[in-house]
Amino acid sequence: MAKVNKIYAREILDSRATPTIEVVLVLDDGGVGVASVPSGASTGTYEAHELRDGDMDWHLGKGVLKAVSNVNQTIFQAISGQEFATLADLDKKLIALDGTPNKSKLGANAILGVSIAFAKASAASQKLPLYRYLAKEAGNSQPLFMPTPAFNMINGGKHGAGNLDFQEFWVVPSHLKTFAQALETGAVIYQNLKKLLARRGAIHSVGDEGGFAPNLFTNLDALEILNEAITESKRKPGIDVELGLDLAANSFYKDGKYVIKDRSAPMEAGEFIDYLRDLNAQYHLRLIEDPLHEDDWRGWNQLTAELGNTTTIVGDDLLVTNPARIRQAVAEKACNAILAKPNQIGTVSETIDVIKESRLAGWKVIMSHRSGETNDTFIADLAVGVGADYAKFGAPARGERVAKYNRLLSIEAEL
């Protein structure tokens, strides 16, 4: 086993011009890991704590110099010169060092940066591709395979500057395709979608995750134009390519009701579930993420009971990669898939454990980026290592998104 020799952090920028933390960890045998931590715009209430400085004279209060200092001082002093047999051993040390339920003392961003950097350094030390090291840490002895990409083509809600309520509109190529074929499909549809939106004079801007942020009359208009782009790309909607949604319902849940532009009046939970049932019947959605408010447990149960046999109901804000929330969701049959985001829980090994629990429940696993990203491709390797069913890394555009898709291309070639 190699010892931790050096560890240091610095403040860098993410894809939204917001600071984040980068961590470098060096083992005494020369293994090096460099990690940068993503950040979300649409966050669940129950996520681990992202430590920000709050100094309005530095990056409008969004600086992470406290998190950087926690790595360079507190964490360095605690782990320098120590050996850790597994990634889980390191993560347990970091969790104990923090000592809070949500990692608010040191910051989940500081802890995760160290966790990822150690994983990368250990993979290098053991002369393993990162995805194979992560598969070993996850106890995944099954043949490795490529996740199906879910491309975020149209951005609304908190991710877009247009006028749509729903946060993400996806195209999901058939899982029967190779990853290279699926990526080509996504890229061609993206190019044709751009032309179709331009023809309508609807292009407003590009959202945080690379998808277009148009002004359209309703959320359904976005699904219609996606089907048109699929057809324009000489693919068959519902066969070659399916659709998916991240509603991020927290963002339009007001005073106990769901308020969207497609309906003139606010909807009670039961009415909104009826609306979603009709929506699914019309568009045959492959994935529906965060269709209801994060605390509307009864609604989640009802929706999953009605649609769970024909589509995948994905918990993100509902679950926030948190084991306690997942156990409750399993007990209440609230969904049948997890959106896994390491920065929601704060360490890599905890993310792996949560995925294992989800698998035991028979759920699908979607590995996800965040709206504020960097060029770090760690989650691509993690998706393959844990056997994720889907990879949600944004549009097939913008460097910080494409880096992850290109990493999957490289892994596919190796496999």
Image: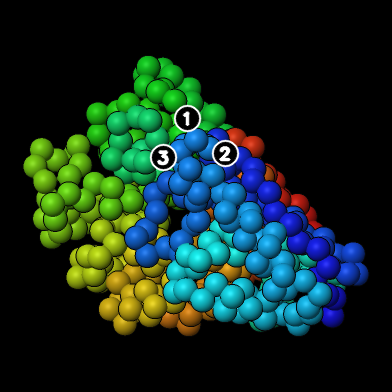
Residue at 25% from the left image edge and 29% from the top image edge:
217
Q: Quadrant of the C terminus?
A: bottom right
Dot 3 falls on a residue whose secondary structure is helix
Query: Looking at the image, what colour scheme do you see?
Result: rainbow
Name the amino acid type tagged 2.
Ser
Residue linked to disc 3? 159
Residue linked to disc 1? 206
Residue at 72% from the left image edge and 66% from the top image edge:
76
How many angstroms separate mark 3 from mark 2 (CA)? 12 Å
Residue 11, percent from left and from top: 64, 46
Q: Which of 271 and 339 lies nearest the eye of the viewer?
A: 339
Dot 1 falls on a residue whose secondary structure is loop
Q: Which of 263 and 70 lies nearest the eye of the viewer?
A: 70
**Sequence-first disc among 3 and 2:** 2
Badge 2 density bin: few <14, some 14–19, many ≥20, Cα 10 Å: many
Residue 361, percent from left and from top: 43, 80
Q: Which of 319 and 184 lies nearest the eye of the viewer?
A: 319
Dot 2 falls on a residue whose secondary structure is loop
Residue at 90% from the left image edge and 64% from the top image edge:
30
Residue linked to disc 2? 15
